Amino acid sequence: MAVRKKEDATRVLGDVSGDKRFFCHDGCIASNLQQLAECLSHMDEQSYNHHVTGEKNDFSNWVRDVFGDHRLANELARSRNKDEAIRVLTGRIAWLKRKLR
């Protein structure tokens, strides 16, 4: 789903609850994209590599399946490391916030 309207940006930036939250290997729990960025910034490489391998990218899958932001999900899937994933995520969050103005 493309983010075209303010309502889409609001939904993507919003919180999810219950089993839709992201439960990181290191114990961090994210209910929204900003919290995911914070979890990533504190995450060690071992935990990151638990979620991202050559066969899977849990962060990309979560963004696609829970928020429906295919653009962000695809960019996260192409990220080569944790720092790049953080840059992609924080850049998208900033873009979404600008969309709300």
Image (cartoon, helix red, strand yellow):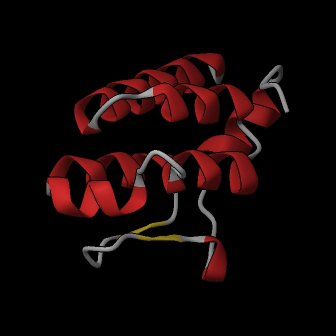
Looking at the image, residue 90 sits to the left or right of residue 44; the answer is right
From what the image shows, is residue 49 above or below residue 20? above
The structure residue drawn at horizontal position 51% and vertical position 25%, both measured from the top left corner, is: 92
Q: Pinpoint residue 91: horizontal percent, then vertical percent.
A: 42, 21
Q: Quadrant of residue 5?
A: top right
Residue 32 or residue 63, whichever sits in front? 63
Residue 49 in the image, given as x and y percentages of width and height = 30, 55
Q: Is residue 14 left or right of residue 79?
A: right
Residue 61 image position (x, y, % from top left): 63, 51
| Res 68 visible | yes
Task: Give the quarter of the figure containing the C terminus.
Answer: top right
The residue at 30%/72% (across/down) is: 28
| Of 73 and 101, the residue lying toward us | 73
Residue drawn where x is 33% and y is 25% of the image: 87
Check the image and name the residue furthest to the front: 54
Q: Quadrant of residue 69?
A: top right
Quadrant including the N terminus: top right
Count of numbered tags: 0
Asked whether residue 43 appears in the rendered view, the answer is no
Q: Residue furthest bottom?
A: 18
Residue 15 position within the rendered picture, expressed as x and y whole percent measured from the top left: 59, 60
24 relative to 32, above or below: below
Name the residue at 42% across, 50% down. Answer: 53
The relative height of residue 70 versus residue 49 in the rendered view (above or below) is: above
